[in-house]
Image (cartoon, helix red, strand yellow):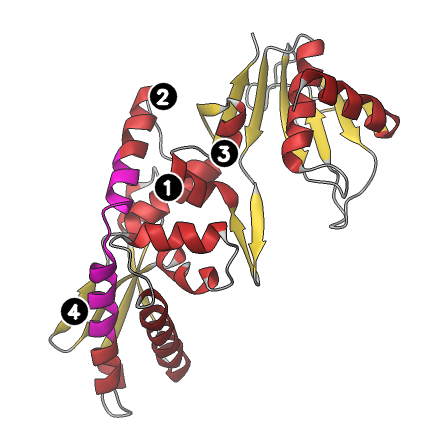
Amino acid sequence: MSKQTSIYYLIKHSVNLKLNIVKSITNNIEFYSLFYKQITNDDILPFKIDYIHPFTSEVNNDCYIVNLHKLDDISGSQIMDLIIHFNKMLNVQNIYVSDGATVKIGNLKTNLSFIKMIETNKTYYMRFGFDFTLYGNNDYTLRFNTIDDLHNLLNRILKNIRSITVKQILDEYNKLQTILNLINDTNMNNLKIYLKGRPSIVPAYASKIYQKVITIDVINDLKKETDSIIDLISTFNYKYIYEILVELFNKRDERYEIISNLTLSQRYITKFEEHIIKRKYITWFHLLSLLIRDYLYVLKLQ
């Protein structure tokens, strides 16, 4: 968005802007909060900006974008450009934001930046010049000494995700299909499924394997997932699975909901008698999701 266009939208929408003085409920510090009064179709504010550091609670020349959602006549990207231009006028030094950007594909509401990072090495907010900070959003966030350390891990994650082949996934699900075809009422209890804990700074939590309770519904869901994944990825000629993820995502194809099972699943090990399937790659998907979701981003204006 050009400077002139930014000013146009700023003037056009300024009637709906409201600036309040807010007192923090944790430390009673007062700060300014700017928000757009019109409510979106999802009953949320299009944007809200708190002029306070989101972690240190310092009231300086920093601000934090609490909300950012599109309107009928202005996209989320246009609002983001407007926010950047407006805060430059206010002499703001740093704009902080958490990445909650989502899109809806079929019935699935999914993170916009997850696939964009795999595809382009950039999240949604990085398009505007934002980069990671070392501020994590919760106690289970990975910790880094420097931003370079974070980027080095991110590059490893992306390299590993991009190396997962379609053949590897087809072989896995064909093997799972074989296992499921062997299961009946008498041997069902021999099926063992283990779920891997999400990555975190708590070693006991990160390394813990949870055993899933096996029921007929669990088996039926696995059969449905297996048939759907095999049918879907067999229709593509790509070598790597991320290429299918990117194409379905960018086309907003409802079949993306099927293949998202690969990125969202916690099913780490499946065992049945002498058969075993270990899905090491899910750790890379979990780590990428954690980095995107749990870290603050910063745009340095000065």
- Residue 27, image x, y percentages: 66, 22
- Residue 77, image x, y percentages: 63, 33
CA–CA distance between discs 4 and 3?
36 Å
Quickly name the residue at label 2.
Answer: 147
Q: Quadrant of residue 47?
A: top right
Quickly name the residue at label 4.
Answer: 276
CA–CA distance between discs 3 and 1?
22 Å
N-term mark: 2 or 3 = 3
Most distant residue in the front direction: 237
N-term mark: 4 or 3 = 3
Q: Residue at x 72, y 30 (%)?
A: 48
Q: Residues within 10 Å of mark 4 (few under 14, many from 20)?
A: some
Select label 4 or label 3 by which is in front: 4
CA–CA distance between discs 2 and 3?
16 Å
Quickly name the residue at label 1.
Answer: 118
Residue at disc 1, secondary structure: helix
Q: Residues within 10 Å of mark 2 (few under 14, many from 20)?
A: few
Nearer to me, 253 or 57: 253
